[in-house]
Amino acid sequence: MGLFDRLSRVVRSNLNDLVSKAEDPEKVLDQAVTDMEEDLVQLRQAVAKAVASQKRTQQQYEKNQSEADKWQQRAQLALNKGDENLAREALQRKKSNSETASTLQQQLDQQKSQVDTLKRNLIALESKISEAKTKRDMYKSRAKAAKANQELQEQMGNMGGSNAMGAFDRMEEKVMEMEATSQAAGELGGTGVEQQFAELEGSSEVDQELANMKAEQQQQLAGSSQRESLPAGEEDSSSSSSSSQSDDEVVDAELESLRSQLNDQNYQSDSRDQQRS
């Protein structure tokens, strides 16, 4: 294979590739229908010319046939009059016209066949053009739909890297972060309230425990009073009075200790609340 052949093949392949890429289905379909319509116009003109030529041949044939018949009658007339020379001349004219009419008859048969063929081709081309127009509209619609779908797929493929989608992603993360912060702040606020109620409940428990201790102490004192059946002397009264005073002092000291513990707990709770605020 020569260099020029290879170069020619490369050039033709590249040109074909460029043409294929440049072909727009809608434009090519429209152009194809336009070309077919131009062919139809030319075919109609050819049919019209063939029909006109056939008509002229038909007229010439009829004319020569009529002349031949006329000279046949004249030859008969001359022969009846006894003029053989004139009859011979008439027969010569009749023969010439008959031969011409015979030739025209053959030509007329050929023209009729050609006209019939052209008319069939014309009808077939008209049918093809009508079918091509229907298919063209269908293919154009399908091409538009395919092109729109391709553009949509490309846009959807490019949306992931676009600035708009990036902005949406950032705003989504920001909103989620704001929601999380708000939720955390609500939980922290709820913890403070829960703690305050817990402290109040703790204070109530301390007060209840103190009341229980007082009731138990009063029961002990009442039991001691019942065990004393008779009043004692002054020493016993003095001793009992001093014992009662010492018991009261013990109770007061224990009560004061409990109060101090409660005050310490309240002070620590207030300190923690101030630190949170």
Image: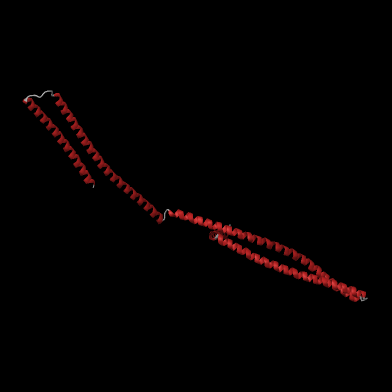
Q: Give the quadrant of residue 223.
A: top left
* Number of numbered discs visible in the structure rendering: 0
Residue 157 locus on image (x, y percent): 45, 53
The location of residue 190, given as percent across then percent down, is: 29, 44
- Can residue 258 be seen by looking at this rendering? yes
Residue positioned 47% across, 55% down in the render:
154
Q: Residue at x 58, y 61 (%)?
A: 29
Furthest-front residue in this view:
230
Residue at 63 percent of width and 64 percent of height: 37
Q: Which quadrant: the N terminus?
A: bottom right
Would you identify the image quadrant in which residue 52 lies?
bottom right
Colour convention of the picture: secondary structure
Query: Which residue occupies the foreground of this view, 228 or 102?
Result: 228
Q: Tell me if 251 is positioned left or right of 113 in this view.
A: left
Give how far across and how far down residue 258 sits, in percent: 17, 36
Q: From this viewpoint, is residue 7 visible? A: no
| Extreme-right residue of the structure | 82
Left or right: 31, with 262 as reference point: right
Q: Nearer the viewer, residue 244 or 222?
A: 222
Residue 218 coordinates in the image, percent (x, y): 17, 30
Extreme-top residue of the structure: 229
Residue 166, image quadrant: bottom left
Q: Nearer the viewer, residue 200 or 96?
A: 200
Identify which residue, 110 or 233, lies in the foreground.
233
